[in-house]
Image: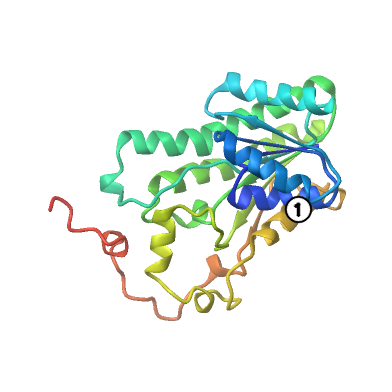
Amino acid sequence: MVLVTGGGSGLGKAIAAEFARLGADLLIAGRTAGRLEAAREELARAGDGRVAVAACDIREPAAVARTFDACEDAFGSRPDVLVNNAAANFPVPAEELSPNGWRAVVDITLTGTWFMTREFARRHLAAGTPGSVVNIGASYAWTGGPGFAHSAAAKAGVKNLVETLAVEWGPYGIQVNGLVPGLMPHPDMTADIRGALDRAPDQDARQPALRVGHPRELGWAATFLASPYARFISGHTLVVDGANWQRRALVGDPVVPVREQLGRRAFGD
């Protein structure tokens, strides 16, 4: 049984779809009931497994506990696999990032991931059962992310959780891995991120593989990490981006300030 946060849309739904095609029972969690129900109907057609939904704000530990209770109510058991996909993000120059904007992104992306992972582990530790956690990360956890200071800091924390918890919980059969998507356009991308991409056309030619990724490719990687084939892999973050984050030019491109890249006026104007 697989629990996917943020599974009602975008890459989370694409990940859930690949588990569904393999026959897994699914619980998808998110904050928007209508979106979850539409996804449930779509995922139910993708495979033979059962699909349930749970409205959950992962920033609230009590809501997180209720989501795990919903898994047990729906399927009679705790989830074997947790995919922490839910996150928040928006592009903004760091000097314009508000305290509320910072808190919203960090609380959902990092703190919410921690609350979900902690609840998953506590239930498996109490039962003495193994489990698998897959945290969705971002390559700027290594490189930094100009224009995304809030998200990059949070994703760096998520990556560190992978490495810390894999060691701490390894003796109990709980593996923890990370999964980083490259550019994988999908209909649920936010307008601001879509707008940023539109200002840099021909994305295929900007990737070493000469194409962008497909959301299902992230799902394939997630099902591998959660499968018996990856049982001895833990504490690792797998990047699925066609080597884009490792690309280096012999001579660097001219530096364009983040404000200009986002089409912003000079600060203070």
| Image position, residue 224 (x, y; %) | 79, 54
Q: Is residue 174 visible?
A: no
Circle 1 residues within 10 Å: few <14, some 14–19, many ≥20:
many
Q: Is residue 39 left or right of residue 19?
A: left
Residue shown at 83% from the left, 21% from the top: 127
Q: Is residue 121 left or right of residue 152?
A: right
Residue shown at 32% from the left, 75% from the top: 254
| Image position, residue 26 (x, y; %) | 76, 39
Visual colour scheme:
rainbow
| Image position, residue 79 (x, y; %) | 78, 32
Residue shown at 33% from the left, 50% from the top: 92
Q: Is residue 142 placed above or below 99 in the rendered structure?
A: below
| Image position, residue 208 (x, y; %) | 57, 76
Q: Is residue 177 visible?
A: yes
Image quadrant assignment for residue 165 = top right
Which residue is identified by label 1? Answer: 18
Q: Identity of the amino acid at label 1?
A: Glu
| SS assignment at label 1 | helix
Q: Nearer the viewer, residue 130 or 192?
A: 192
Q: Is residue 126 placed above or below 247 in the rendered structure?
A: above
Quadrant (top left, top right, bottom left, bottom right) of the N terminus: top right
